[in-house]
């Protein structure tokens, strides 16, 4: 089967990471995979050597916004014509919008892959795409059953496929764990990731636990670095919060982390949470409208806190910070969650969907 992906960038972020993981496994299983993206940006995730990368943008960058979009539509249509894929997968709402418009009249099945929670308060344009335009897709893949409910009955061709999790085994002694509370996310999304809530939850504990610190791994460009640092300073947490920037090897950090804190106001699937469980981290998370209980098979390995309850989050952090026994208990409790998202299980679901859509032509 020849599968053609469209994604704006493969540089970093959850959508790019998931696309790389799925594409690699499909390639290893004998499918021909092509990824169309902005090749002027670095690819932040390792790709199988058989995967082809094609440029999304033509070299000619002149013209107004309308002309640039017209060239992009022509480019998408030309790439599909010249590569004759069995399936096209567009990643994220705005990409799905222009890809499907570009392919008007062409008979190749198009799958819209949405990588964020439908509870997220997105722009009116994204809301329109999700709740109206998604109806023209041959299939819409969302992350959770909670998103299936939120999408409602207007979009019938939808299916929930969870993120795959490919993690190294954590076989080290728990003694390697340091007094680190880890959070992950780009600083430009500090509001969605709830870093301000995490700082507020940690602030009343800081004096009582002077050997603990928060570590945040995620892209740290300006002006967001300065904004987040101002929050830290305002709560007198200077020196207690470390901003690492983007980290390509997150597992080495998780392996020495004692507590993973998911303070997000909105989460889709939270691949990072399951990855943290795989590395023996005890976790604290806001419930995110029920998503966290769904993802963790009923809250295994996680102390789940009511959305927005900063005091509750702080209390659960305190419980874990003062009790090595409780951290170990949660770490053991969370291990079985990871197997539910094995690469083979998840990729098989994608394959089944692709074969169903393209039938005998695959």
Image: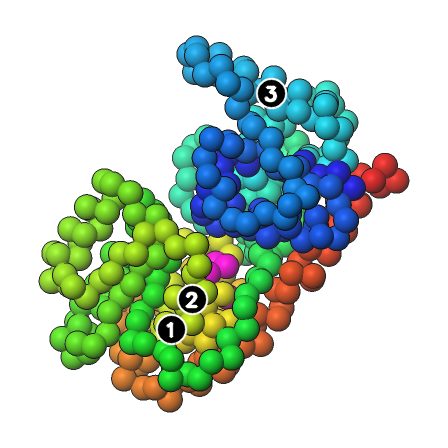
Any magenta on residue 272? yes
Q: Position of residue 339 (x, y in %)?
A: 62, 71
Q: Along the horizontal axis of the image, is 211 left or right of 18?
A: left
Q: Earlier in the sequence, mark 3 or mark 2?
A: 3
**Does 30 appear above or below 208?**
above
Tell me where residue 209 sits by quadrant. bottom left
Which dot, 1 or 3, sits closer to the camera?
Answer: 1
> Quick one: quadrant of the N terminus?
top right
- What residue is shown at x 56% (from left), y 28% (from top)? 55
Q: Which residue was labeled with disc 1?
A: 256
Residue that carries the numbered disc 2 in the rendered image:
252
Residue 4, visible in the rendered structure: yes
Q: In the image as oriented, which residue stretches furthest toward the front?
A: 49
Q: Residue at x 69, y 62 (%)?
A: 345
Q: Which residue is mark 3?
A: 75
Which quadrant would residue 307 be assigned to in this image?
bottom left
């Amino acid at each position: 089967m020849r599968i053609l992906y469209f994604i704006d960038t493969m540089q970093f972020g959850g959508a790019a990471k998931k696309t790389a993981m799925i594409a690699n496994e499909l390639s290893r299983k004998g499918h021909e995979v092509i990824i169309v993206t902005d090749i002027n940006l670095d690819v932040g995730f390792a790709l199988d050597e058989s995967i082809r990368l094609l440029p999304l943008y033509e070299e000619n960058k002149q013209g107004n916004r309308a002309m640039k979009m017209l060239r992009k539509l022509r480019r998408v249509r030309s790439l599909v014509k010249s590569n004759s894929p069995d399936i096209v997968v567009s990643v994220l709402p705005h990409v799905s919008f222009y890809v499907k418009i570009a392919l008007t009249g062409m008979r190749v099945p198009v799958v819209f892959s949405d990588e964020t929670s439908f509870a997220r308060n997105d722009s009116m344009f994204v809301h329109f795409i999700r709740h109206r335009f998604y109806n023209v897709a041959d299939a819409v893949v969302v992350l959770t059953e909670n998103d299936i409910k939120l999408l409602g009955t207007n979009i019938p061709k939808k299916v929930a496929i969870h993120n795959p999790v490919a993690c190294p085994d954590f076989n080290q002694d728990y003694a390697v764990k340091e007094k680190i509370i880890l959070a992950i996310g780009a600083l430009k999304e500090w509001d969605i990731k709830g870093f301000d809530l995490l700082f507020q939850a940690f602030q009343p504990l800081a004096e009582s636990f002077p050997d603990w610190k928060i570590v945040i791994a995620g892209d740290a460009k300006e002006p967001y670095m300065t904004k987040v640092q101002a929050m830290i300073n305002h709560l007198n947490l200077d020196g207690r919060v470390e901003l690492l920037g983007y980290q390509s090897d997150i597992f080495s950090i998780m392996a020495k982390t004692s507590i993973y804190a998911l303070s997000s106001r909105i989460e889709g699937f939270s691949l990072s949470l399951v990855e943290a469980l795989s590395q023996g981290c005890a976790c604290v998370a806001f419930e995110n409208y029920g998503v966290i209980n769904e993802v963790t098979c009923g809250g295994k390995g996680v102390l789940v806190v009511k959305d927005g309850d900063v005091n509750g989050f702080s209390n659960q952090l305190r419980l874990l910070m003062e009790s090595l026994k409780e951290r170990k208990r949660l770490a053991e409790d969370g291990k079985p969650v990871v197997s539910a998202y094995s690469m083979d299980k998840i990729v098989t679901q994608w394959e089944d969907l692709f074969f169903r859509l393209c039938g005998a032509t695959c």
